[in-house]
Structure formats: structure tokens, C-alpha cells
Image (spheres, helix red, strand yellow):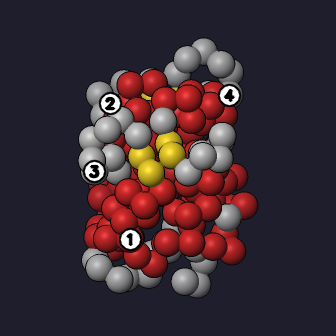
Amino acid sequence: MSSIKVKMSLMYALVLLLPALAFGQTVNLKPYNLTATAMFLQTDTDLSGDIDRPELDASFRDYDTDRNGRVSRTEYMTYLSIHTPSLAALHDALFDIYDVDNDHILDHHDYDNFFGLMDGNGDGFVSHFEYVRYWTILLQDLEHLHLDN
Ligand SMILES: *[C@@H]1O[C@H](CO)[C@@H](O)[C@H](O)[C@H]1NC(C)=O
């Protein structure tokens, strides 16, 4: 991505994310590819154009309020219900997707698996294309949990 394109996308990301910051406001995630792009830019903190494993780990760190290296369902839902309360049903379903071993705790091996799901060509990096493809399908599949909420 050229730096001009990155800056344009960041502007879109801000426009998209600002409404979500207002407490209790409904959130429209359509078009999903733009929401996915905004999420990608938030996760790709070094703006390399790819998400690597440390960046994925870091994206879950905010939820880990007791800083024990693991994210419980309670930590995750508490954090997200403050930030986007109208998306609680979606977040609950996403937790189940992240939590592959179904132990209600997110940790390193859940992130390994989730990273693998997004890393379509298995090269160890999740490109913007791979990320947007994965998340657009996921947000579509889970549409019943976040549309008209
Ligand atoms: C999102 O999808 C629309 C319709 O397919 C397309 O026109 C647009 O370029 C896409 N935007 C991004 C950022 O992928």
C-alpha cells in the first residue's frame, strides 16, 4: 500500500470508528470490507501492510485487564460492553470463534489457530487482502447478530 492510500484508509477508519465510541449507540458495520480495513489498520500498528503474530497478540492485550497473559470471557465481554455495548451478541460469538479449545480462556494457542485461519497462504503474515477476505465473510456470516441491533 502506498503511504497516500494508507492515510486515506486511516481517515476512513476514523470516520467508521468514531460512532462506535459514543456510548450505547447502534453500530452499522456495513460495508464489511471497509470495517475490516479499519480493523486491519488498527491491528497493523507498524503500518507494514501485513499483520504478524506479535501484532495479533498485541490486539488481544487490551482485554487482559488482570495482565496474566490470558483473556477470560468475562474480561473480554466487560471490556467490549464498555466500548460497543450494542455489539455484545457479536462479541460473544467472536469469543467462541477465537476460543478454539472451548475452555473460555483465550491464550497463545488460540491465537496461533486464529492467525492460521486468516493467513490464507500460510506465509506467516496476514496481508490486507487475506484479512479483509476473512473478516468480510465472518461479518456476513454473523450478520444476524449485529444488524438492526
Ligand atoms: C469494498 O467492496 C466494494 C464493493 O465490492 C468495492 O467497490 C470497494 O472498493 C471495496 N473497498 C475496499 C477498501 O476493499
Whichever of callouts 3 and 1 sits on the residue coming sooner in the sequence is: 3
What whole-number distance in Å separates the C-alpha atoms at marks 2 and 4?
20 Å
x 51%, y 51%: residue: 36
Helix, strand or loop at mark 1: helix
What type is the residue that disc 2 sits on?
Leu
Whichever of callouts 1 and 4 sits on the residue coming sooner in the sequence is: 1
| Mark identifier at residue 65 | 3
Whichever of callouts 3 and 2 sits on the residue coming sooner in the sequence is: 2
Helix, strand or loop at mark 4: loop
What whole-number distance in Å separates the C-alpha atoms at marks 3 and 1?
14 Å
What whole-number distance in Å separates the C-alpha atoms at marks 3 and 2?
26 Å
Identify the image quadrant of the C terminus.
bottom right
| Mark identifier at residue 81 | 1
Any part of residue 77 in sight: yes
Q: Residues within 10 Å of mark 4 (few under 14, many from 20)?
A: some
| Mark identifier at residue 70 | none
Question: Pointer 2: what residue?
Answer: 47
Image vertical order of residue 136 relative to residue 144, above or below:
above
Image vertical order of residue 1 relative to residue 81, above or below:
above
Look at discs 2 and 4 and give the one toward the viewer: 4
Identify the image quadrant of the N terminus.
top left
Picture coordinates of residue 103 (x, y %)?
60, 46
What type is the residue that disc 1 sits on?
Ser
Left or right: residue 45 compared with residue 132? left
Helix, strand or loop at mark 2: loop
Question: Pointer 4: what residue?
Answer: 120
x 34%, y 62%: residue: 79
